[in-house]
Image (cartoon, helix red, strand yellow):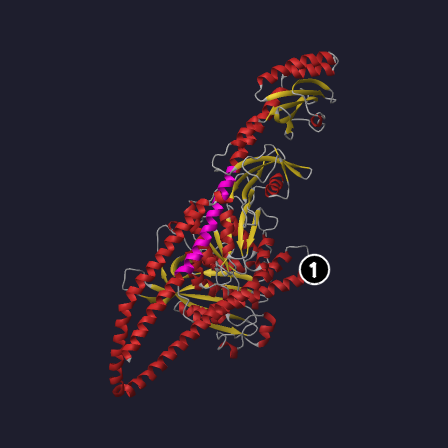
Amino acid sequence: MRLQSAKHLQKAITRYSALGIFAIGLIIALVSILPLYQHLKNSENERLLFAARSRTMAVEQFLSKSQEITLQITSRSQIKKALTDYIHGKITLNQLAAETAVRLSDAMNQSTGVVGITRFDAQGRLVAQIGLPLLEGEQLFPKDLTENTQIGNPIIQAGVGPLLVVSGAIIGTQGELLGVDKVIFTLNELAYIAADNAGLGQSGEMLLGRVLDDQGALFFPPKKTDRIKGSEVSLSSEIGQAMQKAVAGETGVLVPEDHNRSHDIISYGPIEGTSWAILVRMDAEELYVPVQSQVALIAGIIVALIIMGVIGMTILLRPLTGKIIVQTNELEDEIRQKTSALEKELRERRQMETALVQAKEEAEVASRAKSAFLANMSHEIRTPLNAIIGMADLLWETPLNEEQKQYIGIFRNAGNNLLALINDILDLSKIESGKMEPKHIIFNLADVIGETTNLFTPIAQEKGLCLKHHLSTKAPLFLEGDLDSLRQVLLNLLANAVKFTEQGEITLTVALETDKLISSDSQEEPELFLHFSVSDTGIGIPQEQQARIFDTFTQGDVSTTRKYGGTGLGLSICKKLVELMGGHIRVVSQPGKGSTFTFSARFRPFYLESPDSLNFETPAPGSTLLSSIPLPECTKQVPLPAQTVHNRDPFRNILLAEDSQVNAMLVQLYLKGLPYRLDIVENGEAALEKFRLKNYDLVLIDIQMPIKDGYASTREIRQWEQSQGRNAIPIIALTASVFPEDQERAVAAGCNMLLPKPVKKMILLDTLSRYLPGSEIAVTVDKDT
């Protein structure tokens, strides 16, 4: 019974596997062949369009030659002298006509393709006519012709064939109009061009015509189609529709929608300087014969491969499944025999393992949920916040009355406070999760102290405070340590001191703790501790509140929060950052007299003979430094790419990929009135297509977008640039995420720089100026920005 069941199972596995492979193969074949077929058809259409363009150049060369011959006839000095003498009464009209006839005969004999010349004086009177006369419609004097030449429409004259009339103005030495020549050319050369069917097969041909009085007319009757009788063409026909588009200045390929009958593929285009249309038609069946052959060959190969794969898989699966089934039955018998003796012990162990695995999974799920929540929260809050702060900044730059300025100021301050709160929460979360690791950097201590205090000098002066700093001469000038954490702690403490002090002074002091030198077994310098102190004469902190001032979400009292704002996270972040630097932080304060915050941090001294030999950390341009906001991650960037200097066009083309219409409008308003042309798309796929069609100088790309995100789009743009042999243009990533792993991922994908949202106008314009040489914009930002 078991053997019989095993055989049925073996057959079922083999049968369904073969069917599944065959179905998957067919789906893959269909998905790949249909786009290939359309691509090959498009290639043939492009070939037909190229044929029309090459013949357009030949026709335009013929017209240009006709215009040059006309200008040579009208610019002869003897002709101008005779007309001038006639105008001034020196010779009579008969004398002028006789001399003009001689001159025009010589000119016609010397000019190729000229079969007639008719001359008018400046008043439109007929002076002389040589060769073929003008038809009735062409005898009118062109009053609007004052210089150069004018090409008329081809005319048909019995016994002669198609003719072309080119009018040319005769201009005197003072720029006055002396007369007009109308030169008649034969169109034999155009007939030869139209008869040239190179590359058009048996059914293809070139057509040349125009649209007049709601009716199409061909200069030369078609020879390879029975759909047109004579030279007249209905504008509702396929050729008439293509002719209308060409006369309107369009260039393209007309593919009829009705594929149930034999039809033509028509490429069309205008003739520059005329109202003519050039068409190249070819029977669709003949045009697409190579396409059908290639697709049929590829389809046959794919089907053959699928069938071979199904047969091979069936042969391989049959013995393999038999062995598996037999071994499975044997193992089931063996396990069943041993299970009875070990069942109790295994149950207990499984329960224990299940509990451990469940606990581990719950911890991992909680950690992932927290990280995902923070990332989503950052993105979802920063995206609308970008629009809120950006629009408020733009409103601030418009003419406002005092009341409106007050409202907009409240609007901007609220947005910046909300941004500070978000950054504080994210910083605290990164520290508590252990994701923030110290970054050891060599830096100049005096520069860091000076730059940090300089940031708060304007605010202190506005409040009438004295802000000063003192660096002990015993402290080493160059240090190696966690510069980012040190800078953020100093910024938080100085920001609190300025905020809570209404009068008096604020002092930052740095000294060496000589009793805390840490020796090292290596040849490196021993580590040391620096003592930092920030003193103020502000409101102070009550004694009962000092013990918990460094706890999360804690301030002096509720009234402090109501009056000065804040979340109570700044000092908690300072405490954790100081502990990461191996030190401790404390406070000494008296209500009404001020506070002194002190902390210690561990560093390694760095000694060198020439400080100029190293590049030290300095704040990035456009960095926003608020009370508890770390340096923006926009400092993470790769070197500027090679740029091509634009000498002619002062405008730079920028592509913006942003799914948020509000944020896209904000960037558009930032660049309003500046020498930038901005194209906006809503997703990464559209950005890639747009980038391939147009030359851009820079790309601004959002990271989180539908269809295709910023990472994938950037990678594909870089791959396309490399495949085309093009220089890499700057790509600036815009993101509402501020996690380091997201920034590293953006740089790895090929971005030159990452700007976190909300993006300030000053930072965006500064970034564009640095990445687009020659487009520097002077940006003026008030103190409230």
**Which one is nearer the viewer's eye here, 185 or 547?**
185
Q: Quadrant of the C terminus?
A: bottom right
Q: Quadrant of the N terminus?
A: bottom left
Residue 6 drawn at (x, y percent): 29, 75
Residue pictured at 27% horizontal, 87% vertical? 340
Quadrant of the rendered structure where residue 121 is? top right
Q: Is residue 670 left or right of residue 586?
A: right
Residue 59 drawn at (x, y percent): 56, 31
Does the magenta-highlighted stretch encompass residue 763?
Answer: no
Q: Look at the magenta stretch and give its main secondary structure.
A: helix
Quadrant of the rendered structure where residue 135 is? top right
Q: Which residue is mark 1?
A: 402
Q: What is the secondary structure assignment of the residue under circle 1?
A: helix
**Which one is nearer the viewer's eye here, 311 or 761?**
311
Magenta-tinted stretch: 25-51
Q: Is residue 558 above or below residue 297?
A: below
Quadrant of the rendered structure where residue 606 is? bottom left
The reply to whether residue 512 is in sight is yes
Q: Is residue 554 above or below residue 212?
A: below
Q: Is residue 336 left or right of residue 466?
A: left
The reply to whether residue 473 is in sight is no
Does the magenta-highlighted stretch encompass residue 28?
Answer: yes
Q: Is residue 623 left or right of residue 166?
A: left
Residue pictured at 65% horizontal, 13% vertical? 102
| Amino acid beneath label 1 | Glu
Q: Is residue 189 above or below residue 8?
A: above
Residue 598 drawn at (x, y percent): 46, 69
Q: Residues within 10 Å of mark 1 (few under 14, many from 20)?
A: few
